[in-house]
Amino acid sequence: MKAYIAGPLCTEKDRKFVEKMSRLCESLRIKTFLPHRDCGLWKNIKDTKRIAEGDLNGFKDCNLVVASLNGFGVGTGTAWEMGYAYSKKLPIIAIKTDRKIEKSIEEISAIIMGTTKIVSNFKDLEREIKKIIKNKN
């Protein structure tokens, strides 16, 4: 199995959070595509094409998307990645640890809430990933 790890990458704290998500998947023997690790970070406008192509290639052979919804508002890149995954009929599991999901409708959007399994901690994230693994076998 392979998981695409989506989430904000603007700060070191954001990157450490998605890296923790990636390590969880890897501990369950799932290969991961982690955009900033595998494509690099955006530094200037010249990086746009390289990153876009790299991220799209990251979806190859993916069976799952694991996304961070932390922060106020889902990042535009994360929202795009989740929409792309949805169009490819990939299961999407998201985690939001910084605010209760029920109080986050303005931050997340009804369409994401209605189409995505969202958990609030890493224990539940692991449980949901294991369900996907079980269904794939």
Image (cartoon, grey):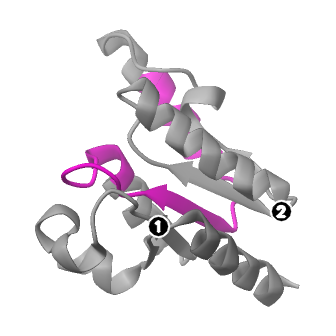
Label of residue 63 in the image: none
User: Is 62 contained in the magenta span?
Assistant: yes
* Crowding at mark 2 (Cα within 10 Å: few <14, some 14-19, many 20+): some
User: Is 29 contained in the magenta span?
Assistant: no
* Crowding at mark 1 (Cα within 10 Å: few <14, some 14-19, many 20+): many
Q: Residue furthest left?
A: 106
**Quarter of the view holding residue 65:** bottom right
Q: Is residue 49 above or below residue 1?
A: above
Please, what is the three-letter code of the amino acid marked with disc 2?
Leu
Q: Nearer the viewer, residue 126 or 49?
A: 126
Q: Which residues are magenta?
A: 49-78
**30 to the left or right of 96:** right
Residue at left offset 42%, top offset 62%: 82
Residue at left offset 83%, top offset 62%: 28
Q: How many marks?
A: 2
Across and down, in percent, residue 78 comes to 37, 51
Label 1, on which residue?
Answer: 94
Residue at left offset 37%, top offset 83%: 115
Across and down, in percent, residue 133 comes to 79, 78
Q: Is residue 50 above or below residue 56?
A: above
Label 2, on which residue?
Answer: 28
Nearest to N terminus: mark 2 or mark 1: 2
Across and down, in percent, residue 58 comes to 63, 44
Q: Nearer the viewer, residue 32 or 129?
A: 129
Q: Which image quarter holds the C terminus?
A: bottom right
**115 to the left or right of 27:** left
Across and down, in percent, residue 129 comes to 68, 74
Residue 61 visible? The answer is no
